[in-house]
Amino acid sequence: MKRNHRTLKAWQQAMDLVESVYVATSTFPAHEQFGLTSQMRRAAVSVPANVAEGFARNGSKELLHFLGIASGSLSELDTLVELAGRLNYFEQAEELQGKVDEVSGLVMGLAASIRRKL
């Protein structure tokens, strides 16, 4: 049976977060297209991409490594959402912050579960 990252709630919610980030940043000022907009999108995409890549690797330690990268990207995204909110680029900052926190909890929970099995 092939392992499939799509079954992971952390990956599913991370994909929903990416979608939310793309929608939110679509209204940012044009002068931020290659700045904050791009950086937020890259950080968001990094989360499910690293969960998927780690899941496809050949061991728990490698998966933990990629979950660590995903967690770092979530922290980066958290900071960027805060900044965009402070700059009044969008009104959904608090809502998006909640989604970041939710995905972060799932990623950290998955990592903790894997560590317990090592």
Image (cartoon, rainbow, N blue to C red):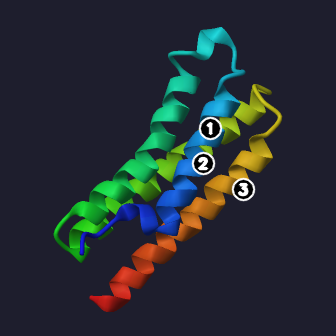
Q: Position of residue 72 (x, y in %)?
A: 44, 53
Instruction: Write down the quadrant of residue 87 in the picture.
Output: top right
Q: Tell me the distance, in whole angstroms, between the alpha carbons under discs 1 and 2.
A: 6 Å
Q: Residues within 10 Å of mark 2 (few under 14, many from 20)?
A: many
Under tag 2, what secondary structure?
A: helix
What residue do we see at 60% from left, 40% from top? Answer: 19
Name the residue beneath numbered marker 3.
Answer: 98
Quadrant where the N terminus is found in the figure: bottom left
Q: Secondary structure at mark 3?
A: helix
Instruction: Choose mark 1 or mark 3, whichever is in front.
Output: 1
Q: Residue at x 64, y 60 (%)?
A: 101
Q: Is residue 79 above or below residue 63?
A: above
Residue under the point 69% across and 20% down: 28
In the picture as drawn, the residue positioned furthest to the bottom comes out as: 117
Label 1 with label 2: CB-CB less than 8 Å = yes
Q: Is residue 46 left or right of residue 99?
A: left
Dot 1: element: helix
From this viewpoint, which residue is outermost toward the top? 31
The residue type indicated by label 1 comes to Val
Query: What count of labels does the image hold?
Result: 3
Residue 21: which numbered mark, if any? 1
- Asked whether the residues under the numbered discs 1 and 3 touch, taking CB atoms below 8 Å apart as contact, a structural biologist would say no
Q: Crowding near pointer 1: few (<14 within 10 Å), some, many (20+)?
A: many
Query: Residue 22, relative to residue 107: is it above or below?
Result: above
Q: Residue furthest right?
A: 91
Query: As shown in the figure, which amino acid type bears the numbered disc 3?
Result: Gly
Give whichever of discs 2 and 3 has the lower sequence position: 2
User: Which numbered tag is attached to residue 17?
Assistant: 2
Amino acid at the residue labelled 2: Leu
Front of the two marks 2 and 3: 2
